[in-house]
């Protein structure tokens, strides 16, 4: 096969540059999932419980949220199929439009049944479908060299969520419907035009002759199906690693009570969140750089070991320097796990069926995030504290880290020799 012409090289360069536009659009799409996420719904939880239009206890609301999250997690699978079938722009446009409409509809609701439907739909289209799409966008554009773009994506994402909470802060004492309405109109007025005007599909951007480049053909046309990927140990190990992290994230619901039980004042909770966020932000770009040079399995092993060590030591944290060390470890370990979760699927299994694969893996995290708080609450109810939960999560983390010593990350071209067809 001859060398590609200068015109094709120019197309390749423009295509690479536009991939960074997609990184920004994808990060914006993930921030747009906020009304379907726990920390997004958390902004209005107390006001919802006090709303006379809904008569429910805190336990009833938590059960509603649990089942809404579990049912919403099922949206991940069809979203992955739709991405592979219809492309990024079409699916992103529809999901953003529907999510915005559901959020606005929610502001007019009365009655618990309607609220449950609305929470399920925001979880399904926001936390599940839009998250799958956001992560897949970067993977579709960058393929094997995705770790550094994903680190930049993660950095923009962290800043975006921080900015979103600052924008919501003036609404802290307003009626929850006012805040929710503002979010709905932002989805339709800002994110929807971005989806329509800036989102592109990499394969459709390249002319047919571009596919004669051997590397480009390999990048776009070869890859594992979901069934083939599920036959590999790497698929399940990385899936379990991020699910473990999702369970740990359930601690955020109880961090203030945990710290108070260990002698800290209430403001330590906010210091803890800030320190963890800063540590994660500082770690993201170095982790992305290392991801292009170090085995992803070895990096995941280190990330899990750091988090497991921190979890093991949390019950013994009594001073601010100790809390700072804990937060630094959790921030760095979390950054490693998050970036690898964003990156590994396209790097290991290719881009051809990435939507299917990303959809299934995202569903695992959604289910884990729903069950995590329940697990922690049960431990507290049965033992009078959270220490047993810390120890169990730590042991699981160390076991997973040890398992990554034996995991080999596959390459997309291995799909041609895997059992079954890649078509």
Image (spheres, rainbow, N blue to C red):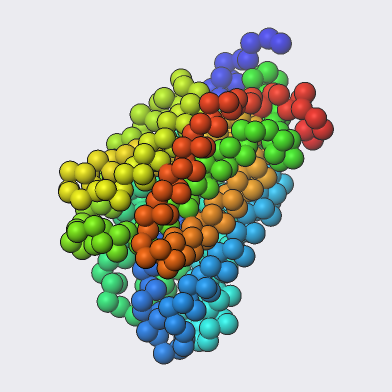
Q: Position of residue 380 (x, y in %)?
A: 40, 64
Q: Is residue 155 visible?
A: no
Most distant residue in the top direction: 2
Left or right of 372? Residue 177 is left
Determine whether 55 is above or below 91 in the image: below
Left or right of 36? Residue 232 is right
Q: Position of residue 105 (x, y in %)?
A: 52, 77
Q: Position of residue 345 (x, y in %)?
A: 59, 36
Most distant residue in the front direction: 383
Determine whether 386 is above or below 208 in the image: below
Left or right of 85? Residue 127 is left
Q: Is residue 375 visible?
A: yes
Most distant residue in the bottom direction: 52
Q: Position of residue 106 (x, y in %)?
A: 50, 77
Which is nearer the eye, 230 or 382?
382
Residue at the (64%, 48%) spot, across then down: 360
Residue at the (55%, 64%) spot, across then down: 69
The image shows a total of numbered marks equal to 0
The answer to which quarter of the image holds residue 223 is top right
Residue at the (46%, 77%) spot, across then down: 59
Which is nearer the eye, 326 or 142?
326
Quick one: quadrant of the C terminus? top right
Determine whether 414 is above or below 263 in the image: above
The answer to which quarter of the image holds residue 383 is bottom left
Which is nearer the eye, 172 or 364?
364
The answer to which quarter of the image holds residue 255 is bottom left
Residue at the (71%, 11%) spot, across then down: 1
Left or right of 280? Residue 186 is right
């Amino acid at each position: 096969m001859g060398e590609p012409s200068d015109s094709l090289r120019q197309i390749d360069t423009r295509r690479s540059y536009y991939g960074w536009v997609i990184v920004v659009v994808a990060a914006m799409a993930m921030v747009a999932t906020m009304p379907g996420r726990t920390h997004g719904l958390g902004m209005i939880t107390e006001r919802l419980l006090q709303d006379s239009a809904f008569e429910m206890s805190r336990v009833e609301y938590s059960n509603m949220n649990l089942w809404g999250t579990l049912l919403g997690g099922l949206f991940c699978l069809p979203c992955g199929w739709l991405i592979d079938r219809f492309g990024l722009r079409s699916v992103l446009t529809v999901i953003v439009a529907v999510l915005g409409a559901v959020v606005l509809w929610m502001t007019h609701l009365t009655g618990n049944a309607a609220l449950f439907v609305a929470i399920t739909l925001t979880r399904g289209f926001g936390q599940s479908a839009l998250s799958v799409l956001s992560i897949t966008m970067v993977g579709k554009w960058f393929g094997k060299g995705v770790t550094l773009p994903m680190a930049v994506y993660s950095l923009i994402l962290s800043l975006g969520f921080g900015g979103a909470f600052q924008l919501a802060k003036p609404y802290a004492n307003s009626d929850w419907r006012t805040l929710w309405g503002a979010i709905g109109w932002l989805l339709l007025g800002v994110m929807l035009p971005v989806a329509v005007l800036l989102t592109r599909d990499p394969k459709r951007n390249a002319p047919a002759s571009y596919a004669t480049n051997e590397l480009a053909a390999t990048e776009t046309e070869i890859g594992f199906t979901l069934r083939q990927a599920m036959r590999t140990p790497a698929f399940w190990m990385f899936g379990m690693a991020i699910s473990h992290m999702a369970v740990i994230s359930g601690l955020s619901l109880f961090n203030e009570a945990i710290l108070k039980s260990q002698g800290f004042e209430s403001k330590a909770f906010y210091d803890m969140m800030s320190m963890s966020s800063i540590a994660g932000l500082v770690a993201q770009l170095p982790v992305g750089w290392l991801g292009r040079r170090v085995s992803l399995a070895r990096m995941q092993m280190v990330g899990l070991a750091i988090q497991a060590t921190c979890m093991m030591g949390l019950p013994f944290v009594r001073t601010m320097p100790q809390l700072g060390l804990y937060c630094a470890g959790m921030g760095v370990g979390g950054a490693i796990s998050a970036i690898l979760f964003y990156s590994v699927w396209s790097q290991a299994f290719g881009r051809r069926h990435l939507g299917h694969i990303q959809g299934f893996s995202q569903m695992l995290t959604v289910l884990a995030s729903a069950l995590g708080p329940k697990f922690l609450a049960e431990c507290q109810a049965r033992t009078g504290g959270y220490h047993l939960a810390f120890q169990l999560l730590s042991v699981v983390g160390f076991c997973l880290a040890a398992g990554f010593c034996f995991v080999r990350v596959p390459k997309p071209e291995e799909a041609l020799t895997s059992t079954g067809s890649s078509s």
